[in-house]
Image (tube, coloured by chain):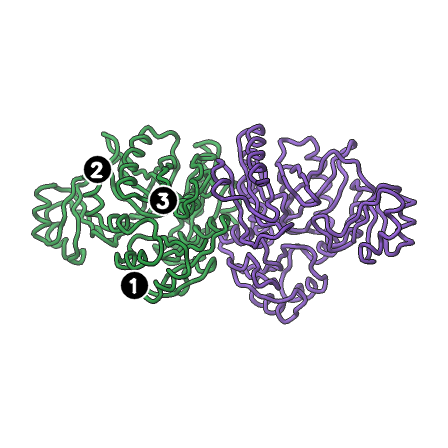
Chain colours: A purple, B green
Amino acid sequence: MKVGVIGGGQLGQMLAQAGTSLGMKFVFLDPAKDACASALGEHVCANYDDQEALQQLAKEVDVVTFEFESVPAETVSFLSDYVPVFPNAESLRIARDRWFEKTLFKSLDIPTPDFANVESQTALENAVIKIGLPAVLKTRTLGYDGKGQKVLKNQSDVTNAFAELGGVPCILEGFVPFSGEVSLIAVRGKNRAIRFYPLVHNEHRQGVLHLSVASEQHPLQATAEAYVTKVLEKLDYVGVLAFEFFEVDEGLKANEIAPRVHNSGHWTIEGAVTSQFENHLRAIAGLPLGATQKYTESAMLNFIGAIPSAERLLSIESCHLHDYSKAFKPGRKVGHVTVCCKTMDELKQKTQAIEALMSH
Amino acid sequence: MKVGVIGGGQLGQMLAQAGTSLGMKFVFLDPAKDACASALGEHVCANYDDQEALQQLAKEVDVVTFEFESVPAETVSFLSDYVPVFPNAESLRIARDRWFEKTLFKSLDIPTPDFANVESQTALENAVIKIGLPAVLKTRTLGYDGKGQKVLKNQSDVTNAFAELGGVPCILEGFVPFSGEVSLIAVRGKNRAIRFYPLVHNEHRQGVLHLSVASEQHPLQATAEAYVTKVLEKLDYVGVLAFEFFEVDEGLKANEIAPRVHNSGHWTIEGAVTSQFENHLRAIAGLPLGATQKYTESAMLNFIGAIPSAERLLSIESCHLHDYSKAFKPGRKVGHVTVCCKTMDELKQKTQAIEALMSH
């Protein structure tokens, strides 16, 4: 089976590493000449709206998937005319737009922060009256890793906020006093079977994921699974979906979904029986899904901007390095490590040892 | 780091899957146009004695390794003039020739079957007098998977045996009444550190590896480790080495070594903390070696000639498929599965379920 992937970054790279074992070949569409996944397959170097390139891709492959959701809707619908695309166009349409996303959560009775659509400064001011401050103004599309958002603490923050985010359609979200952030990685097959990984605790730094720890029997696992099931079934979703939640006193509040393999699921490569990457590919290929249990306790640490010395990292037992072969650049995700240990205490110690290497 | 690999089959493919995580890129030298590893790196499509191609490879990469040992000695010595080669030329020279190999074992006091060098029919007849029958006549080089050998049960088998194996240099080995076959996968780093995986029980069918089961605390683990250490140190070996033994009443008798990642170590991809592929690459790159413990009980089954339906295989929980993307052909290794389970009983059940799929 030949799989087309829109985007050729590290997610594409890890998909190809997993898919090679399933006998799959890969074609990546990515405008970047140095797209890191390109070493593991063919590389169609073109823009995402290049219809000729899309057609070429569609002709060559059996199925198309995405490694990021900010793909133009036209790209997806164009491709869907020629080749099966998973997840489907509707899932991408919803997931790439915070307003559609939260509207979907609300319609499915999934708790979510208060929110309002904001298409002008006037609309913003009305929304602030309704929702109150503090609140967060976010662009509806194209925001990621804390980009495209602004925290509004008091009235003076509101004054130019709409213009400051570029005057594009936004969503205002009530600030949620959360105690933690968790994500649930789920996968749904063509036969509608669903599997869930254990809930993952996520810690962000400057808006970017820093640390993910797979939880031990989280008390809200079943609650999260019920919410995610609603979304998967509503969208007739096929593939891996990541669902991020805020942990609040009452339980969980839905933050956002990513219709793809997700950074907070990277630990599954070494830490779970079947990785999120393999399960995504199994799903879109119509194969049975793999088991999602943890082997051991697992944590994942992101390397932003640079990777500490491999020599030192690999001296730490059970430290699994993933170097994406990307040029180092401030703020760029260039790699990660997964640490697998028998106990949570040991996991914490090793995680701290790696953090110490990162700060040097 | 860019790694050159002589050979572009499934071992090269699995090296590249592992090495990608370490930020490595791969160049494969293989005369086969459809070399299965070629999807995961550059492919220099040339014969192994093509000096121009070897020079091109040497220029492009930081280090060279091998996925099979039947490489002409000239290839290795030629490459060694331009680029570091691991394992070293001497290790390959020994490992590719059964006479050198067994002579080394003997010189290191490692028990091995009786053996004699056979370069003519007369030499064979003298060797039979010395060693007795039954015995096995094997070509000194290029034999693998039971090819290039002939069992001599009685005098009439001896008559034309030397000519039947092509009149090439051979070795006669006394038949060993063994109760089992085991292999020890070891890895030695540039800093001389050595790590061992658990001994693996191997079952062959028609001379080809069929099943490998990672053992539980094998009573001869320490004995095997001592033997392998002698060889690794004598050869100043860097990389993964597989050492095959016969289990006999008195302990172990050395059969042969393979100076590379080995089929009986494939289970380490899912079953051990660090796979043999990653550890081989860590070794040749001068990085610290990774832990070699088992996560769970693990077994590997080879697919020879064809792979059963992926749909059915993957319905078996904890069954990890490796489809090498090779055309199906009788006798050809086209894939394998690893099964990981908590108990040996469960492992046996699942292994049998997979064997049942294979016979359909």
Outermost residue on the bottom side: it is: A52
Q: Chain of mark 1?
A: B
Q: Quadrant of residue A176?
A: top right
Residue appearing at x 91%, y 44% in the figure: A130
Q: Horizontally, is A290 left or right of B340 in the view?
A: right
Q: Horizontally, is B240 left or right of A249 in the view?
A: left
Badge 1 amino acid: Asp
Mark-to-mark CA distance, 3 and 2 = 20 Å
For marks 3 and 2, the one nearer the N-term is 2
Outermost residue on the front side: it is: A360
Residue appearing at x 24%, y 33% in the figure: B248
Residue on which the image places disc 1? B49
Asked if B55 appears above or below B273 in the picture, the reply is: below
For marks 2 and 1, the one nearer the N-term is 1
Mark-to-mark CA distance, 1 and 3 = 24 Å
Mark-to-mark CA distance, 2 and 1 = 33 Å
Q: Horizontally, is A237 left or right of A130 in the view?
A: left
Marks 1 & 3, CB-CB < 8 Å contact: no
Residue on which the image places disc 3? B240
* Callout 3 secondary element: strand
Q: Judge the density around disc 2: few (<14), some (14-19), many (≥20) Cα neighbours within 10 Å.
A: few
User: Toward the viewer: B310 or A187?
Assistant: A187
Q: Position of residue A244 (x, y in %)?
A: 71, 43
Residue B263 seen by the camera: yes
